[in-house]
Amino acid sequence: MAQYEHVPCHVVDARYLGDYKVWLEFNDGKKGVVDLADELYGEEFEALRDKNRFADFTLDYGLATIAWSNGVDFAPDYLYERLHPVH
């Protein structure tokens, strides 16, 4: 069984929008934009301050969220809480 099946909310689609913004869709149908510009502090997130590296995320089905090749990710519920609906 996939790990994401144990997570109440999980990311099912993600698209880079520019700067540090990502459009996300969750398994319950909620969609919107998360701006992570203010969340990239600390040593582990330093590499993601480079916008080209930030844009190079993948949808990690095991973690049910977006993740980067350097092992950094944001918990799906953390992203869900910060989602701003697009009108």
Image (cartoon, rainbow, N blue to C red):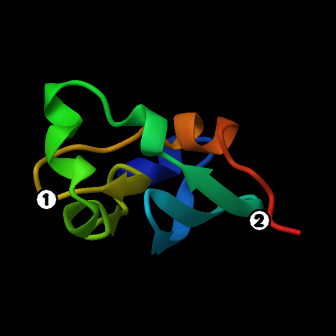
**Residue 27 appears in view:** no
Instruction: Please state, as top left, top right, bottom left or bottom right, where the N terminus lies in the image.
Output: bottom left
In the rendered structure, the answer to whether residue 42 lies left or right of residue 62 reads: left
For label 2, the crowd category at 10 Å Cα-Cα, with few meaning under 14, some 14 to 19 and many 20 or more, is: few
**Disc 2 to disc 1, how far (Cα)?**
27 Å
In the rendered structure, the answer to whether residue 48 lies left or right of residue 61 reads: left
Q: Is residue 42 above or below residue 82?
A: above
Callout 1: SS: loop
Q: Which is nearer the eye, 61 or 5?
A: 61
Query: What residue lies at 42% left-to-right and 34% top-to-bottom?
Result: 39
Badge 2 amino acid: Gly
Query: What residue lies at 23% left-to-right and 69% top-to-bottom?
Result: 52
The residue pinned by badge 2 equals 29
Tag on residue 85? none
Callout 2: SS: loop
Query: What residue lies at 30% left-to-right and 28% top-to-bottom?
Result: 41
In the rendered structure, the answer to whether residue 41 lies left or right of residue 75 reads: left
Query: What residue lies at 22% left-to-right and 24% top-to-bottom?
Result: 42
Question: Residue 62 falls in which quadrant of the image?
Answer: bottom left
Nearer to us of marks 2 and 1 is 1
For label 1, the crowd category at 10 Å Cα-Cα, with few meaning under 14, some 14 to 19 and many 20 or more, is: few
The residue pinned by badge 1 equals 69
Where is residue 21? Give x, y as percent: 51, 60
Where is residue 79? Give x, y as percent: 56, 43
Q: How many marks?
A: 2
Badge 1 amino acid: Ser
